[in-house]
Image (cartoon, grey):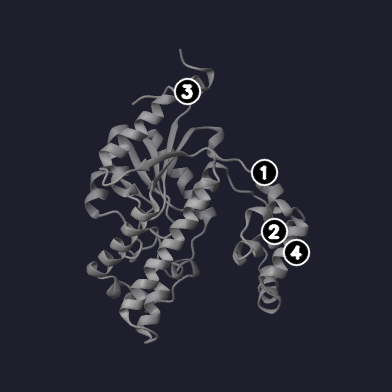
Amino acid sequence: MLSRKSQVRRRKPKIIFLVGPTAVGKSQSAVYLAKKINAEIISCDSMQIYKGMDIITSKPSIILRKTIPHHFISMVSPIKGYNVAQYRRGALKKIQEILEKGKTPLFVGGTGLYMSVLIDGIFQAKSENKNIRRRLYKELDNLGKEYLYKRLQKLDPEAAAKIHPHDSRRIIRALEVQEATGKPISVLQKERNGIADNYDVRIFCLDTSRQRLYKRIDQRVEEMFKKGLLGEVKKLLKMKLSKTAQAAIGIKELKGYLSGLYDLGEAKSLMKRNTRLYAKRQLTWFRKDKRIEWIEIKGKEKPVSIVNKILALYSVHGTRY
């Protein structure tokens, strides 16, 4: 007999998140899973949204995208900014469209913030103030990160505890919200409404040994260059890229090479190192979320085996496909 919690789950529409660090193997596994559960895939990746950044963001292959419908890939020009609020609005509409087809929305990617604003919501207060932000960035230049972080610790210790002392962007954002609204960002975040209230949301995170993940990252970077990464980046650098697009790993590293600061081998090494650091940050973010169910990938495990593990976990709570 199903538990009351499982009965409630069955009555709610299902939404699944398949997340994990870069290069762990999400794209192929997602397609196998989508076939099994009659799903359409919604990208949960802050970089794959951009057009013309195919190699540098490791977008799913055209074959995979033809096999199962993929959304929020190659939608925005890299010269335009794109933020989490825009993503949330668009993703909520896409959820409804997919559910109306009788299918399951399957979010796939590694951008934890995108996942968070969907599941938990985003506060609606008018918290953006360019003048305050500009002043805070001047203070950052003159006084340093440590000074601003200590201020945040006094004003909003709960928010400060969740922000790394070196994450100047998030420190400034929290201080901006505090000044603009008169409320700590930690308080406003608790007033959010997300999809978790109305849907049966399950989050599965792929993980593997650090050694295997780093090997896959190194292989991926090498494969990027074989596919023509250098040419793609040359084209991108001719544009006035938005701040978010500029943050893609590979832009800064290859710009240094093209400027003559170091050779191509060094550029590759920097890309591999920075991608490894990014993967560590992704895992740190996901490990803080106790709702996540972890899928351990061992050795050269095939996507069909990974998907079987996910479906086995899903059935634990009384939901079967």
Residue 11's label in the rendered image is 3
Q: CA distance from mark 4 to mark 2?
A: 13 Å
Return the x and y of residue 260 as percentages of the image width and height: 37, 87
Return the x and y of residue 211 as percentages of the image width and height: 36, 55
> What residue appears at the point 39 percent right and 79 percent down from the top-left corner?
255
Q: CA distance from mark 1 to mark 3?
A: 26 Å
Q: Are marks 2 and 3 in contact (CB under 8 Å)?
A: no
Disc 1 marks which residue? 190
Q: Are marks 4 and 3 in contact (CB under 8 Å)?
A: no
Q: Element at badge 2? A: helix
Disc 2 marks which residue? 177
Sequence-wise, which precedes: disc 1 or disc 3? Answer: 3
Sequence-wise, which precedes: disc 4 or disc 2? Answer: 4
Q: Quadrant of residue 225?
A: bottom left
Amino acid identity at mark 1: Lys
Horizontal side, residue 229 vs residue 156: left or right = left
Disc 4 marks which residue? 151
